Image (cartoon, rainbow, N blue to C red):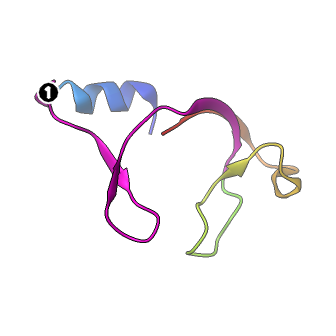
């Protein structure tokens, strides 16, 4: 998802609606913008890992790197 796609989705919502993210093993947490990072795309294929990885990781070698907002 790009920032533009997110903005378009958010503009359709009540501005007072709260935003949540999945909890680690269940439940939900408040969404926060923790930082802007360099992210390597399509690093992991195992279901239990997130698809992408921090660009500083050895696993990121030879992968496409983009700037992204981590929630």
In terms of depth relative to the viewer, which is nearer, 62 or 13? Answer: 13
Looking at the image, residue 62 sits to the left or right of residue 14; the answer is right
Give neighbour class at mark 1: few <14, some 14-19, many 20+ (Cα, 10 Å). Answer: few
Residue at 35% over, 32% down: 6
Magenta stretch containing residue 20, yes or no?
A: yes
Q: In which quarter of the image is residue 43?
A: bottom right
Query: Residue 48, position in %: x, y?
Result: 57, 74
Residue at 83% over, 51% down: 57
Residue at 63% over, 75% down: 46
Q: In which quarter of the image is residue 1?
A: top left
**Most common SS among magenta residues:** loop
The magenta-colored residue range is 12-41
Q: What element carries label 1?
A: loop
Query: Residue 47, position in %: x, y?
Result: 56, 75
Query: Residue 45, position in %: x, y?
Result: 64, 71
Residue at 39% over, 24% down: 4
Query: Residue 27, position in %: x, y?
Result: 31, 64
Looking at the image, residue 36 sits to the left or right of residue 8; the answer is right
Q: Is residue 5 above or below residue 31?
A: above
Residue located beneath label 1 in the image: 16
Q: Report the number of numbered marks.
A: 1
Q: Residue furthest left?
A: 14
Looking at the image, residue 8 sits to the left or right of residue 50; the answer is left
In terms of depth relative to the viewer, which is nearer, 7 or 57? Answer: 57
Looking at the image, residue 11 sits to the left or right of residue 35; the answer is left
Magenta stretch containing residue 35, yes or no?
A: yes
């Amino acid at each position: 998802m790009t920032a533009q796609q997110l903005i378009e989705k958010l503009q359709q919502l009540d501005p007072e609606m709260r935003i949540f993210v999945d909890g680690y093993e269940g439940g939900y947490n408040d969404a926060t913008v923790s930082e802007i990072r360099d992210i390597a795309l399509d690093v992991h294929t195992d279901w239990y890992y997130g698809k992408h990885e921090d660009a500083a990781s050895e696993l990121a070698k030879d992968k496409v790197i983009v700037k992204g907002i981590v929630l």
